[in-house]
Amino acid sequence: MLSLSRISKQYGRQVLFVDTSFQLNPGEKVGLVGPNGAGKTTIFRMITGEESPDEGEVSVPKKMSIGYFRQDVEEMSGRSVLDEAIAGSGRLGDLHHELEALEHAMSDPARAGDMDRILERFGEVQEEYDHAGGYGLEAQAREVLHGLGFDDERIDGDVGLLSGGWKMRVAMARVLLGQPDVLLMDEPTNHLDIESIIWLEGFLKSRPGALLMTSHDREFMNRVVSKIAEIDGGEITVYSGNYDFYERERAIREANREAAYARQQAMLAKEQRFIERFSTHAAKAAQVQSRVKALEKIEKIELPKKRQAVKFDFRTPPRSGDQVVVVEDISKAYGSRVIYDGFDMTIRRGERWCVMGKNGAGKTTLLRMVAGVLKPDAGSVTPVFRRRCRQEDPGAVRRREDAARHRTDAAQPAELPRPRRADEPPRSLHEGDAHRRAEGLRRDDAVRVARSGIPPGAEQSRAGAGRRERR
């Protein structure tokens, strides 16, 4: 269907593609993956002709129609949402608006002289429009817009009053209504709620045309695509399977490549040792030269590039109570639009909540009220979080207290120490040690007297008398 043959592309020093090729066949649904800045959007722009490769060729058949949903949305105003969606739906949309213009011309008395030409052109456009199924276009447009989250009031309203996210949905409706042979979608789920994502998933799976898309929603990609095209290191590698299959297969290929690299390095080291050992031996000269030439012809295996993963380390918060947030009888309205009226909710420790609803239902409003950023009109939102306490090193606290005590003692005049009373506890560490030693000696003497009946000094006196008698 379309192919990229041996393309190369770079921006300044940043090289995106080096002599790589890729082909998209009819009916294939392919997910395009790769790190940010690898060149996914550049692939889309080269297919649509907005950019051209530095080398190589991009081949697109002339009669093939391409629909491209991109991340930037053009200015929309002056039309209803329905007319804006139909206007961008390719040739059928052009015929639809041309028929409307011809109908106004036929009812204009000032153009009565051109009525024959107008009627002739009206017949031609009407025939082509009818043959292409144009009379069901408005019903299809409403169905697509409903699937993307629009209600009838917004569908018939001015597109210029919509926010950027809703205009992105109108741009997507324009692309889907065109029913192109190849659909290019760059992050289609970014501005959609879960109901719209489910509808879009079913729509893309049921359409017969080819699809090439990027998405950060791996589950959405798993359910839609049947192939993965990975951009890495300037090359495009195709895997036959969904995203989960791609991850498993990529890990297996990397392991096999690392093993082959290790085997080749061991072989190269062995051959190099042989060359170095016998390079000066005349008898081995022919073998050495043969191995040198063989090493020059070997295609070196490179290690697979390791992607750097950013690791986040979140501190463990202090344990909260059983009730984390209590929402009691809250009410919230924006003008005449009531979002909440008498709403109650209790969030307990360890629970995991998912807030769902259509756009504008009040999901963000609820989160902002729980976080304390927005106050309800009535009722109360009570967060029962425990305040995080900064735990300080006990040694630092002790050193700071000792320093403060030292400063206080230095500021006071020195005083002479007074004698300690017998019943007074020791005033310092050394005095306490001496006191404990004296108390221990007195306890030992008391035990000895109780056992022998001899006073503590009597043994020393008897020993001295014996020595004097011997002298």
Image (tube, rainbow, N blue to C red):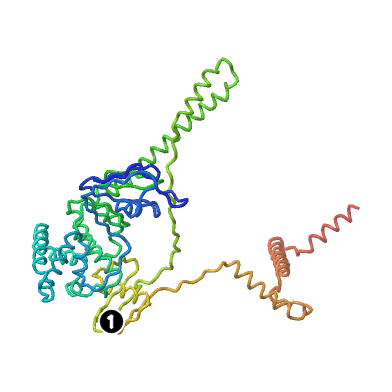
User: In the visual, does 191 lie left or right of 393?
Assistant: left
Residue 235: x and y in percent read 38, 44
Amino acid at the residue labelled 1:
Tyr
Q: Nearer the viewer, residue 410 or 360?
A: 360
Vertical placement of residue 189 versus 362, above or below: above
User: In the visual, does 71 lie left or right of 386?
Assistant: left
In the orientation shown, which residue stands out farthest toward the right? 471
Q: Quadrant of residue 176?
A: bottom left
Q: SS for tag 1?
A: strand
Residue at x 29% of width, y 47% of height: 228
Q: Nearer the viewer, residue 324 or 126?
A: 126
Residue at x 18% of width, y 67% of height: 146
Residue at x 31% of width, y 66% of height: 351
Can residue 97 be seen here? The reply is yes
Q: What residue would you read off at disc 1?
A: 334
Residue at x 60% of width, y 20% of height: 280
How many numbered marks, from 0 up? 1
Residue 371: x and y in percent read 37, 74
Can residue 331 be seen here? The reply is no
In the orientation shown, which residue stands out farthest toward the top? 283
Quadrant (top left, top right, bottom left, bottom right) of the N terminus: top left
Q: Quadrant of residue 354?
A: bottom left
Q: Nearer the viewer, residue 194 or 400?
A: 194
User: In the visual, does 306 lie left or right of 113?
Assistant: right
Vertical placement of residue 352 versus 260, above or below: below
Residue 199: x and y in percent read 20, 61
